[in-house]
Image (cartoon, coloured by chain):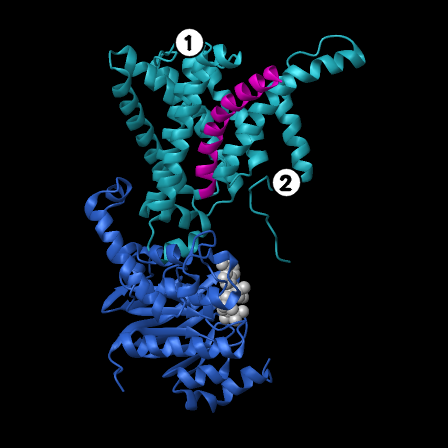
Chain colours: A cyan, B blue
Amino acid sequence: MQFFLEVLIGGLLSGVMYSLVALGFVLIFKASGVFNFAQGAMVFFAALSLVGFMEKGAPLWLAFVLAFVVMTLFGIATEKFVLRKMVNQPPIALFMATIGLAFFVEGLAPLLWGNAVRPLDIGLVDEPIPWILDNWNMVISSFDLAAAGIAFALVAVLALFFQYTRVGRALRAVADDHQAALSIGIPLQHIWALVWAVAGFVALVAGMLWGSRNGVQFALTFTALKALPVLILGGFTSVPGAIVGGLIIGASEKLAEIYIPPVMAGWFGGNFGGIEGWFPYVLALLFLLVRPEGLFGEKHIDRV
Amino acid sequence: MARQIGEVILDLRNISLSFGGVKALTDISFDVREHEIRAIIGPNGAGKSSMLNVINGVYHPQQGEIVFRGEHRKDMDTHAMAAAGIARTFQNIALFKGMSVLDNLMAGRNLKMKCSFLQHALWWGPARREELAHRRKVEEVIDFLEIEHIRKTPVGRLPYGLQKRVELGRALAAEPSMLLLDEPMAGMNVEEKQDMCRFILDVNDQFGTTIVLIEHDMGVVMDISDRVVVLDYGRKIGDGAPDDVKNNPEVIAAYLGTQH
Ligand SMILES: Nc1ncnc2c1ncn2[C@@H]1O[C@H](COP(=O)(O)OP(=O)(O)OP(=O)(O)O)[C@@H](O)[C@H]1O
Ligand SMILES: [Mg+2]
């Protein structure tokens, strides 16, 4: 039981990190109906900028602010040079544009900051928390807990921002109905630039956390692929969905990794490690068959 | 009567609009005077909604000219029109369905807010005071439309008739000088229609708001409007006081379908 809890908690904590990446997708999808293929590239770019500024001698907080400025400029530029040119194009065209954007960023980032794998030290250590180890005999990583805490705080701040500020209200309005938002004078273009900047901020936090765990490297772009099952589970338009979806994926992949191989080995013999790598996708696929709109997504009914 | 019909404030001249091969509007001219209630009527597909969309800049006509408060323009721009005091409702209700009634109306005041997005984002003192001032204004609109009991309800959960009323509320929250209403009473029962009529007349009377209105219910149209323009197949076939329009043979033919 203790062991089960330990795996479960570890899974939930790592799931928060998935939620974070998924959140970046959801924000942009809600506000502009674009599935942003470049979200993973943005995580990479943000983390690389952060490390880059730190290597130039900036302390962590300053590097973080500077990297945020870079991501904001990136968001504004994307709106101005890509999205604005493509209003009223079908979603697939916009999706293709973000694929182009992803390649562009993946090429640009190493050009600006070099392409070596870099360690990122944000002062968090990856050790079991002694207090929990002593009292409950469970191994819970202090890094995981802190990272989850940061991610959770970010999500909470964003939720408050959307719910209680004028900008948040405008954002929700745009997400609900473009035409109506325009008719009351909400500037779509500003909102899009803003959403991309916020998504850039989320990418920066995600990049910082993932990067300090695994090093800042090109593989960060693949975090986007991890977000996909989360999105299918949680629904593309739901912020709570991204959070819950991330938790479910995180917990279930860790549990599957521990508990499925012995069963499989009992049936078929042989070694069934590495389930973690594909289990989320199978889960998402099964889910897709049962509830294609996701846990929290809106059911889409076409009038005929 | 409190209101007095004034000068022409919106003049549409020889407007033509087409979508690919489909001609939605052909060479249409008509004007709107300050403080009046101006109706646009016509059979389905006549081009009424397209006309409204041209006025607030959703559609851009290929030909023609629009004069708004003395300014000559080729077409309109939605943001500029909202800023110039034109608010509207839509034929297929376009509310922010996930948001509460209150939030919908607050969003309607977007352009009235002076503090920048950034100041609001930072929850800066003056921005917060501003928010409260706007909140008071919105409560006035809520009282006016008698929707106090649903102010916190997410709009998507309201019955159709009430949604229409909230949509009018969002438009009113902007304190517009001109209101464009696309079938505000469609799909309502008799009682709801009467309420809506009363609101429209009260808005016009108390605030002097100019109203351009599309409506299918002839009884209502003839009752509340000052002048009526009739469209059919994208052309104008009648224009004038309700009684003149009612007796216009071309209009009668279009409605009885004898010509087509
Ligand atoms: N965005 C569009 N794209 C293509 N065709 C359009 C578009 N909007 C309107 N039309 C066409 O223009 C014509 C006029 O449409 P419009 O909606 O203005 O009519 P309407 O008078 O409002 O009709 P209804 O009473 O049914 O609302 C129709 O033939 C319609 O199909
Ligand atoms: Mg119409």
Local SS, label 1 = loop
Q: Position of residue A68 (x, y in %)?
A: 31, 27
Q: Quadrant of residue A211?
A: top left
State the quadrant of the C terminus of chain B: bottom right
Q: Amino acid at mark 2?
A: Pro
Of residue B74 and residue B98, the one placed in the foreground of this image is: B98
The alpha-carbon separation of the residues under discs 2 and 1 comes to: 38 Å
Residue span colored magenta: A1-30
Residue A224 lies, in percent from the top left, at 50, 25
Left or right of A250 in this view: B149: left
Residue A206 in the image: state x and y as whole percent: 42, 24
Crowding around mark 2 (Cα neighbors within 10 Å: few <14, some 14 to 19, many 20+) is some
Chain under numbered label 2: A
The residue carrying mark 1 is A117
Residue at x 55% of width, y 39% of height: A235
Q: Which residue is mark 2?
A: A292
The question of residue A5 being in magenta is answered with yes
Give the amino acid at mark 1: Val
Dot 2 or dot 1: first in sequence order is 1
Q: Nearer the viewer, residue B15 or A145?
A: A145
Above or below A27: residue B139 = below
Q: Residue at x 47, y 38 (%)?
A: A239
